[in-house]
Every structure is written in structure tokens, then in C-alpha cells.
Image (cartoon, rainbow, N blue to C red):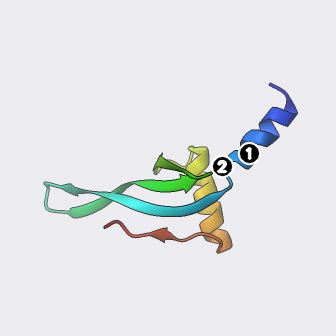
Amino acid sequence: MTQDWGMKQMQNYKNISSAQYVAKDHSDGNGLQNIAIVATIDGLSCFVPLDPANRHYAEILRQVEAGTLTIQEAE
């Protein structure tokens, strides 16, 4: 893998235009819990797990912290 390819990959997931939590209703009585994020990345709808080791999730959190992205609540 060349450095140019790595830089292209870094740029590929920074264009995140929307993000919304996906929630699941647990039968244990705890109600809805967020389980993932559906994000539009480079024009594609992507399912992003809530895992800090996931590069897309880490980038979403970075953009939220920077104030350039807001994660919408689950519907």
C-alpha cells in the first residue's frame, strides 16, 4: 500500500453529510437503546457501528466535537 492510497482513503470518509442514530427496543424494559449510526458518507448510506475502533465512527465523533456535524436522534 502506498502513502498516496492511504491519503485517498482518509479523504474518502471525511465527506459525512448526515448522521442519525439507529435504536433498538429491548424487551428487558429499558426502552430504546442506540445501536449504530446511519450516515451519508460520500453520498452513500452507511451503517456505522458504535465502536471507537471503527474509523468512520471515530471520524463522526471528531466532526461532532469540531461542531461540523450533528448526530440526529433515532426516530
- Note whether 39 is above or below 66 in the view shown: above
- Residue found at x 60% / y 53%: 58
Determine contact: label 1, label 2, CB under 8 Å. Answer: yes
Q: Position of residue 42 (x, y in %)?
A: 62, 51
| Nearest to the observer: residue 3 or residue 53 | 3
**Is 23 situated left or right of 63 in this image?**
left
Q: In the rendered image, which residue does mark 1 sit on?
A: 10
Does residue 70 appear to the left or right of 32 in the view shown? right
Residue 23, quarter of the rendered image: bottom left
Q: Position of residue 36 (x, y in %)?
A: 41, 52
- Where is residue 66 shown, x and y percent of the image? 68, 71
Q: Residue under circle 2? A: 13
For the residues labelled 1 and 2, the Cα–Cα distance comes to 6 Å
Label 1 residue SS? helix
Residue 6, quarter of the rendered image: top right
Q: Residue furthest front?
A: 43
Q: Quadrant of the C terminus?
A: bottom left
Mark 2 residue crowding within 10 angstroms, few (<14) / some (14–19) / many (20+): some
* Residue 36: assigned label: none
Image coordinates for residue 50, horizontal then vertical, percent = 46, 51
Horizontal arrangement in the rendering, residue 64 relative to residue 48 (left or right): right
Q: Residue at x 66, y 49 (%)?
A: 13
Secondary element under disc 2, as helix, strand or loop, is loop
